[in-house]
Amino acid sequence: MNIRQLLDQHISAALISAGAAKGSSAVIKQSAKAKFGHYQANGVMGAAKKLQMNPRKLANKVLEALDLSDIADKVEIAGPGFLNIHLKPEWLSQRLEDALDHETLNIDQVTEPQTVVIDYSGPNLAKEMHVGHLRSTIIGDAIVRVLRFIGHTVIPQNHVGDWGTQFGMLLAHMQSLQTSKGELSMQLSDLEGFYREAKKRFDVEPDFAETARDYVVKLQAGDANCLMLWQQFIDISLQHCDDVYTSLNVLLTRDDVMPESGYNDDLVQIITDLDKQELLTEDQGAKCVFLDEFKGKDDKILPAIVQKSNGGYLYATTDLAALRYRYAKLDANRILYFVDARQSLHLNQVFAIAKKANFVAQDTQLEHMAFGTMMGKNGKPFATRDGGTVKLISLLTEAEQRALDLVNEKNPELDETERKTVAHTVGIGAVKYADLSKNRSSDYIFNWDTMLSFEGNTAPYLQYAYARIQSIFRKAGEIDHNAPLNLQDAAEKQLAVKLLQLSEAVEVVAKDGTPNILCNYLFELAGNFMTFYEACPILKAESDIKNSRLKLAKLTAQTLGTGLDLLGIETLERM
RNA sequence: GCGCUUGUAGCUCAGUUGGAUAGAGCAACGGCCUUCUAAGCCGUGGGUCGCAGGUUCGACUCCUGCCAAGCGCGCCA
């Protein structure tokens, strides 16, 4: 059930039978102000303009053709030609009952399910995960959950960086340590430090650098010993990633890992196929693709290099191979990339080439869900090599510690185990929500305090609303599920409408890949509940009112729980 | 030079194919815990939506130019 869609169907039909052009839309939106009703139709004015007609006159004809008597108390014409729709409390009550009866809150499943590949997280295995990986990992994961929820088949793909130049130096360093497996594992527990040591030696020890370069060649040639060493390194790195994903409550597992190296054998074929289709141009010894759509005002075309003059391949080649795999082997209809905005040009080139070369179908949806770069307080990007990064593990540990301090202060009567659970859930939730609730594709400045805030529009606020409701139910005693749901108080009505709008938020998130819309919805829902909670006593009310309010509380808890789950944030029975 | 992205309250940000008087949170100030969890609620103040034009009944939203910031542009990923 989606109120906006329902009204859109009815009113658009009425608009057309009132004389508007076929395909005209009523443009239904949630009303900007309470006095304008619950929903407003903005499309009449545009349609009237096309008909060269007085908009209020057309609005009148629309009303004549419209029967919303089951749904709405009144539909009135306002201002230059808005239609304001006031929904019927009885109708709202019935929809709330429907939602209470359904596992998934009576949210519509998509009529045409797609297979959607979602490329996210994609850490470089040479280094420990740092805060720069947070956005991709968390936002991508939320979109996986949302698309699944409405009935799409989702295939997550963790395109980890496990191949290329820097692995030579890592292998050389591993080899020279000549330690047993256990001790080596210890050394690698700090991947970042290990990488720095290797890099340092690479820069100052010529012999070591030489060995490192040899390792790259041997690795790419498939040398068995080398591969074994490499595999050992990869396993330890992936274990580190798994630990982070588990702490973060992110769905990714080893099954979703499809590393860069996995496409190694396809790269020759990619070049051959591009060549066959006459898309290749050799320029200064390198093989490039020039496409007209990347021509600037100065008539120069930005090339995409797919093979170096020395025969080596680049990430464009790997990305093309990945696209073909996702289309041909995974049957993707839609492929989403949750990747840093700096790769925008690169990805758009790869998308264009893939279509031109028919590596994907012409109607395969390829979308770069870009986000801004993580910046330091100085306004410059976080350096990855000077130790300027904040490790993801440190951030999560700090978050849990701060949350623990707060729980100890707020709720000392909980036993220690429960306080720790609360601290974990609240701390991780706060970190995730800080990222999920922002849509900005602009750069953002990393800030501990913002990230770990527990007040206002944060995950703990939503978790708190949920926990308050659970507390009520612990004290409620017997609930009469047959009692009618009656909407009397203004706070009840406002909460009721909001409860029915989850599907509208989900609809947008699924289309645009913007979880902040869902965050915003949940924040408003929790806010409406808090107002209701303060204004309308539940347990002290007379039994019919009490039961009705309990139903509202119940559905609020279910809706908050579902919404938070879609964001990958957990709820608590008490906090 | 070319291209992409961004510019909204002191700070962090919303603003859904152009809609009614631009909204939240934080911070500031004032109220509310003998009553279902005060991580909360209610209220007050705070704006030249970067600047200038244009399109129209109507522009934060679309177009053009300019200013500012960030990023990207042939052999790293």
Image: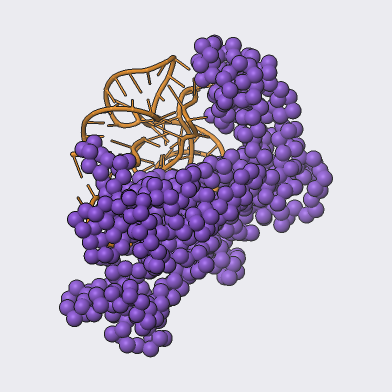
Chain colours: A purple, B orange
Q: Nearer the viewer, residue A345 or A145?
A: A345
Which residue does the image show at 21% across and 58% down from the upper left?
A285
Residue A5 image position (x, y, % from top left):
62, 34
Residue A509 image position (x, y, % from top left):
52, 45
Look at the image and tell me in which quarter the N terminus of chain A lies: top right
Q: Is residue A123 visible?
A: no
Residue B50 image position (x, y, % from top left):
30, 31
Which residue does the image show at 22% across and 42% down from the upper left?
A300
Query: How many marks do you count on the picture?
Result: 0
Image position of A77 (left or right of A318): right
Look at the image and tell me in which quarter the C terminus of chain A lies: bottom right
Which residue does the image show at 57% across and 20% down from the upper left?
A21
Q: Nearer the viewer, residue A109 or B38?
A: A109
Image position of A228 (left or right of A510): left
Specify the quadrant of the image occupied by residue A269: bottom left
Image position of A348 (left or right of A509): left
Q: Nearer the viewer, residue A102 or A34?
A: A102
Which residue does the image show at 53% across and 62% down from the upper left?
A251
Q: Is residue A484 visible?
A: yes
Q: Residue furthest front?
A: A276
On screen, residue A462 above or below A51: below
Residue A374 image position (x, y, % from top left):
34, 54
Specify the quadrant of the image occupied by residue A547: top right
Q: Nearer the viewer, residue A526 or A281?
A: A281
